[in-house]
Image (cartoon, rainbow, N blue to C red):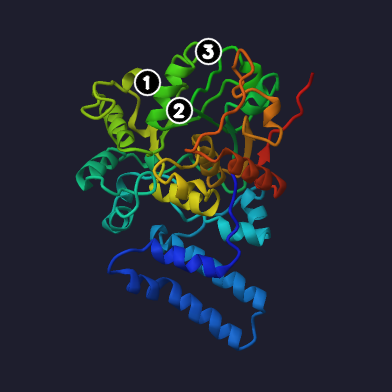
Amino acid sequence: MKSTDHSKTGIVFPRVCRAQRGRNTKLWFCRSIAPACLCVFYWNVLGLMSSEDWRTALYRAALEAEVSWIVNDTAEEEAASACSLRHNIKKEDDLKRKFSFFVPVLQWRDSFINSHWEKLQNEPLPYGWKDQPFYEIGKTLSLLSHPANSRLLERKPSDTCVRCAVVGNGGILNGSRQGKTIDGHDYVFRVNGAIIKGFEDDVGTKTSFYGFTTNSLKNSLVAYYKDGFDKLPRDPGIGYIFIPAETRDYVMLAAAIQGVSVPSGPDEGDRPSEFFGYKPKTHQFKMIHPSFIQYVTQRFLKSPQLEEYRDLYMPSTGALMLLAALHTCDQVSAYGFITDNYKDFSDHYYDKAMKPLVFYANHDMEMEGRLWKQLHFQKVLWLYQRRKTT
């Protein structure tokens, strides 16, 4: 949950160039980075920019070029309400360099275009579609045809404030009495083993979105069944947010929308209706865009584990939901996420006995914890923290 600071521009350009492989590299450089560099150089020569301004502009140009191919060039940033976290982001140079509200959070039918395919087929899951059949990816995304599949929530008029709570499953919530406060938000995100029954006073009852990978969903139903997680949240109108970590996530999504059994792969024979309830509506399904996963990993959670465990590492489910909320909502509160004193609490709020939090190679939880602390300090989100009472 942490952020790596790439403060030296010399580090940025090799990484940016490596991301663009093949015969189009030279053309891409000319169109993306070179003009920005020439402009910055021109102004610097004229003496109209300080050396610090020059470094900042050059760094930002390189970062924007890093994900330029996934940005809608004709997009305009939507008007932010007076309470929006975006105003605080604009006040901090380091935040302005990291946050981009043009990167698509979700993928759906109309986002599957040839130019995206050409770029994303060079990146492995969950960051792209490398080694994935064009037809299969296209067929799955074609099923996400409802306009609601393209956005997390309906934006209210710009003078209203959209408040979101993202609820992790950390033991810090046991005895927190935060249930009513959580339910008071406009939207509530939950993930993985989101047990509510018996813990309403601590975690609330409302669920607007449930985020997961197929692997985390199935593992949660097995691992936490005895604790009370025997089915997914099924609130009216709930949005189910798939994280495409593996091919099976695309296969499961397609079967869920079509109301059929999974035809192949490790989940062959599964009926998603048993997970999501009888015949959920198409508009209830969402799927995180690979470009968004790539963007938040590179900008916020580029852990050393990404190199050491490249085939395993990705941001945690909770981290992706929290970052998705930060790019969608006006105000975001995080509950049940890792804090400095995580060792004082059990792994989950529903643990019947004390279980220490265990770190695995597929996530960098300590980095994520540092990121939440930093964003809390910068007033981009509000992180629930408390001392353990004896």
Whether residues under marks 2 and 1 lie with C-beta atoms below 8 angstroms apart, the answer is: no
Which residue, given by chain and number where applicable, does mark 2 sit on? Answer: 238
Name of the residue lying farthest toward the right: 390
Say what secondary structure mark 3 lies in: loop
Of the numbered discs 2 and 1, the one sitting upstream in the chain is 2
Looking at the rendered image, the quarter that the C terminus falls into is: top right
In the picture, residue 177 is in which quadrant? top right
Name the amino acid type tagged 1.
Phe
Which residue, given by chain and number where applicable, does mark 3 sit on? Answer: 227
Name the amino acid type tagged 3.
Asp
Where is residue 219? Give x, y as percent: 42, 23
Of discs 1 and 3, which sits in the foreground?
A: 3
Of the numbered discs 1 and 3, the one sitting upstream in the chain is 3
Q: Nearer the viewer, residue 171 or 18?
A: 18
> Residue at the spot x=60%, y=33% of the render?
165
> Residue at the spot x=27%, y=39% of the render?
140
Q: Nearer the viewer, residue 80 or 103?
A: 103
**Label 3 CA crowd tier, 10 Å (few <14, some 14–19, many 20+):** some
> Residue at the spot x=42%, y=71% of the render?
32
From the viewer's perspective, is residue 103 above or below residue 287? Answer: below
Where is residue 65? Give x, y as percent: 45, 65
In the rendered structure, the answer to whether residue 348 lies left or right of residue 296 reads right
